[in-house]
Image (cartoon, coloured by chain):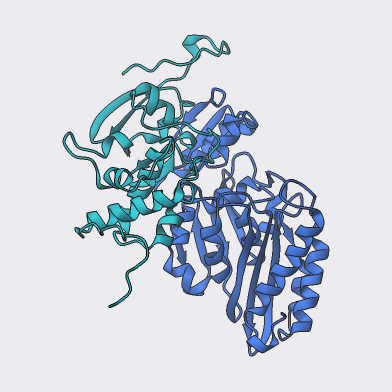
């Protein structure tokens, strides 16, 4: 399969890329890893007239933590970089759990986290993870830079709020208020498949109480679902089996699954509840855990 | 190098945008003129005539088209040929020398790692990327590294054995003799 014809530019600077995007308007598209965009173009679901390939722009392949703990992930940081990152293993349990579950090893060598956020697939794992962590996307355009919280960035299936001349240059995860815990669980039929159900839980605890919680769901609705009710129910509380049960129930209620070849709506809702309980129970003493 | 395109009848030939790229494939330096929408897999198969890189699903699922770009295993059906500009590509044709098979190729032969053989080039390149960074992988490491490559014959068991065989050979360890049936009782 071929994509339809397009003009291809591979600028060496962000300024040059933004000029090209300004010129291309609605018909221009940024390509980073291309692991979602190239298949879409081959299937002719997307037929951009101009591709602005940002792979030749230096200095975008980083992920690093600022002195205050803010994590910054550049637009060309690949999934594989995050999968093998000691920084993530030590400081970001939810991200470290998700990274090896993105697609398959070959796709992870090219695909990027920021590109995945921009692609805004309801079954994209990173959008849930970054939503649970309260992260944002830094967009750079002709008018300068702005930060967009991920919850406002993804507006629907395959829709984000970037202006035509803007490039998502970085994802930012704010520092934790306390100790981080949490994780990401994904039910998939086989490696590389999209999530039947994915649940991201990010907790920040201090002195035995939850300071901040984030729960987000993958694959059980028209877009990534931020379960704010469950997060609110956890905030300020100590994790007890009752509190966990309540959060799991709220998450299951927030899911909007549809019956399809991956499973029935009822099954998917059940798995949301189960995954929330599993993720939240990890910090409990074994005797307190639900069976 | 000449690349022949399918005429889709949707554009005059004068309007077809062509870009000149420079890359290395299996150690040989090349210059090619490609249309931006040409996929890397098509450049390799049609432009260079290296048909060891197979096209399976053409939808980023199966891994039959796996090649190494700067040492990393990627799906060549999901990368544009123009993006190879300035990069180094390795295909299955770059594994053996004139007189000797690559230990991975030998491993696939010794351990019966292929049946129909369609997925084999992709499997071997994904395995090569693993062994280049991890010379002593566990069985779990091998399975994980090959999890993006599908074998429709479902011959995974022997593929994993083949890779472990090659890893041992590359480390200079003698090949282990096949255990004959049940382990013998200690006398």
Residue at the (50%, 45%) spot, across then down: B154
Rendered position, B35 above or below A275? above
Position of residue A28 relative to residue B143, above or below, is: above
Residue A35 seen anywhere in this rendered image of the structure: yes
Q: Where is residue B5 in the image (x, y as percent from the top left)?
A: 45, 16
Q: Nearer the viewer, residue A117 or A278?
A: A278
Residue pictured at 47% horizontal, 34% vertical = B77
User: If the image is split into quadrants, where does the C terminus of chain B sit?
Assistant: bottom left
Left or right of residue B153: residue A249 = right
Letter of the blue chain: A
Judging from the image, what is the letter of the chain drawn in cyan? B
Residue A63 at x, y percent in the picture: 46, 61
Q: Nearer the viewer, residue A278 or B4?
A: A278
Q: Which residue is drawn at 36% across and 31% down?
A: B52
Q: How many labels does the image show?
A: 0
Q: Horizontal placement of B150 versus B101: left or right?
A: right
Q: Which residue shows up at 62% across the image and 45% down it?
A: A119
Comparing A205 with A141, the one in front is A205
In this image, A221 relative to B26: left or right? right
User: In the rendered view of the protein, which quadrant contains the N terminus of chain B?
Assistant: top left
Q: In which quarter of the image is residue B2?
A: top left
Residue B71 screen position, x and y as percent: 32, 46
């Amino acid at each position: 399969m071929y994509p339809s014809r397009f003009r291809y530019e591979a600028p060496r600077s962000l300024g040059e890329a933004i000029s090209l995007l300004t010129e291309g308007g609605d018909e221009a598209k940024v390509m980073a890893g291309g692991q979602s965009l190239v298949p879409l173009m081959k299937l002719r679901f997307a037929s951009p007239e101009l591709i602005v390939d940002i792979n030749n722009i230096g200095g975008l392949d980083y992920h690093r933590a600022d002195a205050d703990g803010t994590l910054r992930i550049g637009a060309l940081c690949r999934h594989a970089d995050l999968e093998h990152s000691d920084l993530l293993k030590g400081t970001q349990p939810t991200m470290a759990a998700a990274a090896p579950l993105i697609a398959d090893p070959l796709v992870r060598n090219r695909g990027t986290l920021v590109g995945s956020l921009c692609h805004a697939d309801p079954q994209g794992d990173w959008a849930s993870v970054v939503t649970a962590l309260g992260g944002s996307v830094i967009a750079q355009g002709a008018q300068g830079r702005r930060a967009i919280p991920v919850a406002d960035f993804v507006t629907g299936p395959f829709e984000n709020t970037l202006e035509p001349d803007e490039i998502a240059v970085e994802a930012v995860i704010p520092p934790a208020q306390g100790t981080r815990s949490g994780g990401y669980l994904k039910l998939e039929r086989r490696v590389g498949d999209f999530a039947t159900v994915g649940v991201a839980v990010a907790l920040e605890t201090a002195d035995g109480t939850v300071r901040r919680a984030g729960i987000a769901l993958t694959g059980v609705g028209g877009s990534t679902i931020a379960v704010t009710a469950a997060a609110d129910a956890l905030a300020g509380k100590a994790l007890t089996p009752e509190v966990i049960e309540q959060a799991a129930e709220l998450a299951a209620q927030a899911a909007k699954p549809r019956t399809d070849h991956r499973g029935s709506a009822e099954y998917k809702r059940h798995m949301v509840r189960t995954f929330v309980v599993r993720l939240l129970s990890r910090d409990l003493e074994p005797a307190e855990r639900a069976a | 190098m000449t690349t022949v395109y399918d005429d889709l009848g949707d554009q005059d030939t004068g309007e077809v945008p062509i870009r000149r790229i420079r890359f290395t494939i299996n150690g040989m330096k090349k210059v090619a003129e490609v249309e931006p929408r040409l996929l890397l897999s098509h450049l390799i198969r049609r432009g260079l005539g290296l048909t060891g890189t197979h096209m399976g699903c053409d939808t980023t699922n199966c891994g039959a088209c796996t090649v190494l770009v700067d040492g990393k295993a990627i799906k060549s059906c999901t990368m544009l040929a123009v993006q190879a500009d300035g990069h180094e590509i390795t295909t299955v044709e770059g594994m053996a020398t004139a007189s000797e098979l690559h230990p991975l190729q030998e491993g696939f032969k010794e351990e019966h790692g292929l049946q129909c053989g369609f997925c084999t080039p992709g499997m071997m390149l994904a395995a090569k990327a693993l062994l280049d960074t991890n010379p002593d992988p566990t069985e779990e490491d091998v399975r994980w590294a090959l999890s993006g490559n599908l074998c429709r014959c479902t011959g995974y068991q022997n593929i994993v054995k083949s890779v472990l065989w090659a890893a041992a050979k590359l480390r200079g360890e003698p090949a282990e003799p096949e255990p004959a049936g049940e382990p013998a009782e200690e006398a």
